[in-house]
Image (cartoon, rainbow, N blue to C red):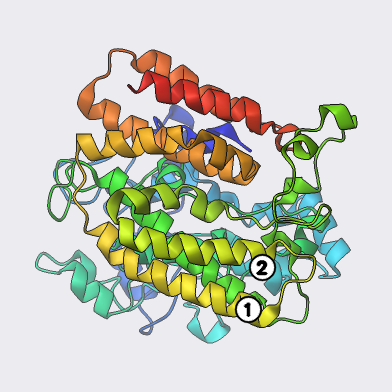
Amino acid sequence: MNTKLATKSLRLFLLPAAAFLLVAFFPFTSSAQTRTSAYDGAGKYTGPGSCASTSCHGSITPRTENDVLQNEYSTWIVKDKHAQSYKALTGNIGERMAGILGLGKAETAPRCLTCHALNPPPAERSRTFDVSEGVSCESCHGPASGWLGPHTERDWTHQKSVELGMVDERSLTKRTEKCLSCHLGSDEKYVDHEMIAAGHPDLFFELDSFSAVMPRHWKEPGEPGAAGQSDPWYDVRELTTGQAVQLRESMLRLASRSKEKTWPEYSEMQCYACHHSLTPPEQSWRQARGYGDRRPGDPPWNASRYAVFRDVVHQLDGEDAGQLDNQISQLTKLMSQLNPDRDAVASAATNSAQLADALVAKINAAAYDPASTLRLLQKISADAEDISGQGEQSAAQAAMAIQSLFVAYDRDAKLQNSAELRAAISALFQQLENPSAYDPARFARQMQQVNALLR
């Protein structure tokens, strides 16, 4: 677990001197050149160079007078790991993984390019497009050729761009779906147990934490010049909505996987239930805790995408929470068997997805304020025993959620013990640095310490 993934204090700031040189000497095209060379057909991908002019999104410093920062490209190319995603395929690890999987060169393998780059069919590529530019602007915002030229006009609206093919990233639901298309996966994009065995890291996600460390290249509602209504608790909404969409999408993926040739798919299980440091029996917390309804030796299901969301739903809607609890409980029992029943899993996962989907809009529209944020912080940190006992992946979700909620609450409440709380939350992430050695009892004690400091 990389602790940097939860460093919520990272925000947009002025580019260093090295970044200035990179941006200043990059062979940008002018706005006029962009509009004429890249605009060669609706629905085509033009490449990030089309956004790179210093008068468009390639400014060195952010602007405050507009509803966009205008340094989005500069932030992406210098600070965002997405810009380096293609290069990861050309290194030793990428090439070794491709060799193990029999894919040939990783940088040309569709299975790798589907997430490590923008890889549309040739007919959808403009003359300026280059796959080696990695996960770039249009990976998230959609093919630009239809709206690239007119979207700079004075009276042009965001909705007009959406109608011409832009992805509506202002919608938290659609933004989460777009992120999860790679950070969770789908039938076309996926990381399975075979890929993990070859060396690919397991996938995990939390929208607000991941957005903070990209770092953000957009204005949140409430910031000066931002589009839309002011929303001072936007990052809390981002976290809760992201959790709802993540659960829904993970349930749909599980239902789909239950029908595939390889079953069970072991990447759906708790990785470190098997891949953990071996200890003498008298020191084994797993044996001391016992296995509940699960037969010893059967790998437990990874329910981490419900670990935190369960507390969100119980705070916002108790009736829906009870129904979802029952479905997830049934699914956990089914999936924590050596050979889960495919049809039963597909049915339970589909039902869970439907319940989660009904909650997405409700949670996104909920009212958030200091009191509700503090209650959610207290609720999650008080759920220490249950969350920590579900394994390292659930603990990671809790740590990221607690960090995000704390930053949002402290920004408004200005807690007197802020430094002490930051240190206590930081200690949660320190316990996740070696997931193979994760100890739920220690993690639970640390969560309880955070909870005590919130009273």
Name the residue located 49 percent from the left edge and 25 percent from the top edge: 448
Query: Please, what is the three-letter code of the amino acid marked with disc 2?
Result: Leu
- Pointer 1 or 2: first along the chain: 2
Left or right for 380, reference 386: left
Residue 218 visible to an observer of this rendering: no
Residue 341 visible to an observer of this rendering: yes
Left or right for 260, reference 3: right
Quadrant location of the N terminus in the rendered image: top right
The circle on residue 334 is 2
Q: Position of residue 273 (x, y in %)?
A: 76, 47
**Near-viewer residue (284 or 250):** 284
How packed mark 1 is, by other alpha carbons closer than 10 Å (few <14, some 14-19, many 20 or more), is: some
The circle on residue 344 is 1
Q: Quadrant of residue 116?
A: bottom right
Query: Please, what is the three-letter code of the amino acid marked with disc 1?
Result: Ala
At numbered mark 2, what does the secondary structure look like: helix, strand or loop? helix
Name the residue located 70 percent from the left edge and 71 percent from the top edge: 111
**Near-viewer residue (434 or 216):** 434
Left or right for 114, reference 123: right
Q: Position of residue 291 (x, y in %)?
A: 74, 48
Q: CA distance from mark 1 to mark 2?
A: 8 Å
Q: Quadrant of residue 142?
A: bottom left
Count all numbered tags in the image, as a single digit.
Answer: 2
Quadrant location of the C terminus in the rendered image: top left
